[in-house]
Each structure stands twice: as C-alpha cells, then as structure tokens.
Image (cartoon, rainbow, N blue to C red):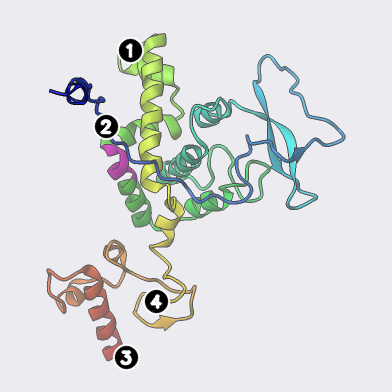
Amino acid sequence: MTHAATKSETRKTPPLVPYRRAPSTRQRGPRGDRYDRREAYQHGAGLGQPARPQAIPTAIVAIDDPLEPGKRLLATVNRRVDILEDERSHGRISVSQYETARQVQAVFERATGARLGSGGWNVGGSRDQTIAHELAIIYAIEDARVVRALLGRVEKAVGTVGARFLKSVLADRQTFAQAAEARGKAGERGTSQVAAHFRILLEGLDEAFASNGLVREIESFFRTPDTGEETDARGTVVPAGHGHAWGVDQARYAAHMNEEAAGLAEPTRPRWDRVAANRRRVSHER
C-alpha cells in the first residue's frame, strides 16, 4: 500500500454541521432604527436629562428632526417604557424583531377594544415614527373578523401557548419575574429562562412576518394589487383603492359569501372561484 493511500484512509472525517436556514429580513424604511445614531446631530440646546436620573434609566437615540425633514436629531428617551423597549435598548432583540413585536402587541391590544396603544404609538406623536403608520392601521381596524384572523396568524407562528404567553407580556404588561413566579420558577434563574423563551418566540414571529409584516396581512383583506380589479360588497367594480379583493385566505371574511353563492361552485374548488360565482350572480340580478 502506498504512503498516499495510507494517509487517505486515516484522515478524519470533519464533523457534520446541521444546516440552518438564513433568517428572513424585513424590508425597512430609510429612517432605520432610532438606536442607530449614525449621521444624527446634537441640537445646540443639548440633551434633556430626567429630574431623577437614578430612577429613570435613559438612552440617547436618533429621531426625525421635526424642523428639517430628512435629518436626524439626538434625543434622550426613557428606555424602560416596557419590556420591548428595554430589550431593544440593550441589544437583546433585533430591530426587525422589535418592530414585529410592536405590531403583534397592537393586535393583542386591539383585540381587547383598545383604540390607541398603551405606549402612545400614533402617527402624530413624538415617539419613533418607523412603524407608526403600521400601528395606526392596526388600531383603526373595525372588523373583528380581521383581528381574529391576525390573532390566528400569530398563533400559527408561535402556537396557542406561545401566543398566550406573548399576550401576557406585551399586552398585559407582565414582567419576566412575574411570569417566572406564576410558573413556579421564581428567582433569577427562572426569570432568565422566561426571558430566553420570550426572545425565542420573537424569533419565530419575526421569521413568519419578516418579509411583509402584519400590515401587509391586514391590507390583503382590503386591497388588490395595483393591476387588479376591486369590487364592493355586492361585487360591483369600483375605482382602485375604494373596494375589496377576496382571495383564497380572505374569502371567508367576505360579507357577500353566503350559502347560495357557495352553491354555485363546486365545494372542492378554491374559495376565490366561489366569490367569482357570487359576483356573476349579483351582476345577473342587477
């Protein structure tokens, strides 16, 4: 046996490394993360300071300059508004996870009847405006069926138990320590385990909604693509932006989906075929 053959037989095989899919990334706006302070300037008046610095933990962030659009201004904010803000300010969760969790928090709060988030997130407020538009859309939802559908998407991403836990933290304001104590794991170690579980759930949410976000899920119930055709509840074609478009997932929420319309199409056909049949029926009756 040659020397080369001996070397090839005795060479160790490298260990197998499990394949992990690259995480999805959200398409973000140009304003970016307010904790990213690059290209932000400090106002001549300086930064604000709380009356009791020891009692109110703060962080320096970059916000949109209200006087000069396109520029960013340094400002002091309370980084312990809630758990999400505290987690993001310490870099424990990513920007994408933070934004997804904010929208899920809004869905939970809207499901309880809230018209404005407990954090005061609104389009005209002074807080981070990166996702203010998305949050305003969620809090403006009037159709309870859409809220239930969004909750269903959240449960599909993290499970029923995971969604219930996220609701207790995001909407009910339960701290990690309180959640650990409720599960019989009081103490520093139990709190750390609960916090780690929370971050894992946020990873799952972010992976499920990272490409479009929850707002695209909402808009899919009400809008068609720019090249599509929109109709009202009776099936009448209306100008773009003034109607509804019902697809496979959205058809069950259509007000004009009734037994008579469904009977015009085969039960095994996709739901959008049933909606098309109903539109033809409404047009014939007119």
Give the number of the disc on residue 18.
2
Mark 1 lies on residue:
185
Q: What amino acid is found at the position of numbered circle 2 in the picture?
A: Pro
Label 1 to label 2, Cα distance in Å? 32 Å
Of 281 and 192, nearer the camera is 192
Q: Earlier in the sequence, mark 3 or mark 2?
A: 2
Neighbour tally class for label 1: few under 14, some 14-19, many 20 plus, Cα within 10 Å: some
Q: Amino acid at mark 4?
A: Asp
Who's the residue at 28% across and 44% down the image? 156
Provide the residue designation for mark 4: 232
Q: Residue furthest right?
A: 44
Which of the image's four quarters has the C terminus?
Answer: bottom left
Estimate the spatial distance between the alpha carbons at disc 4 and disc 2, rounded to whole Å.
50 Å
Quadrant location, the N terminus: top left
Residue 41 image position (x, y, % from top left): 78, 38
Which residue in the protein does label 3 denote? Answer: 286
Q: Is residue 22 visible?
A: yes
Tell me the magenta residue range: 154-159
Give the class, few, some or many, for how many residues have Cα within 10 Å of label 4's Cα (few <14, many ≥20). Answer: some
Q: In what element is the residue under mark 2?
A: loop
From the image, state whether disc 1 or disc 2 is nearer to you: 2
**Image x and y of residue 145, in percent:** 34, 56
Amino acid at the residue labelled 1: Lys
Q: Is residue 154 above or below residue 17?
A: below
The structure residue drawn at horizontal position 38% and vertical position 43%, both measured from the top left corner, is 207
- Residues at discs 4 and 3 in contact (Cβ within 8 Å): no
Badge 3: how crowded within 10 Å, few (<14), some, or many (20+)? few
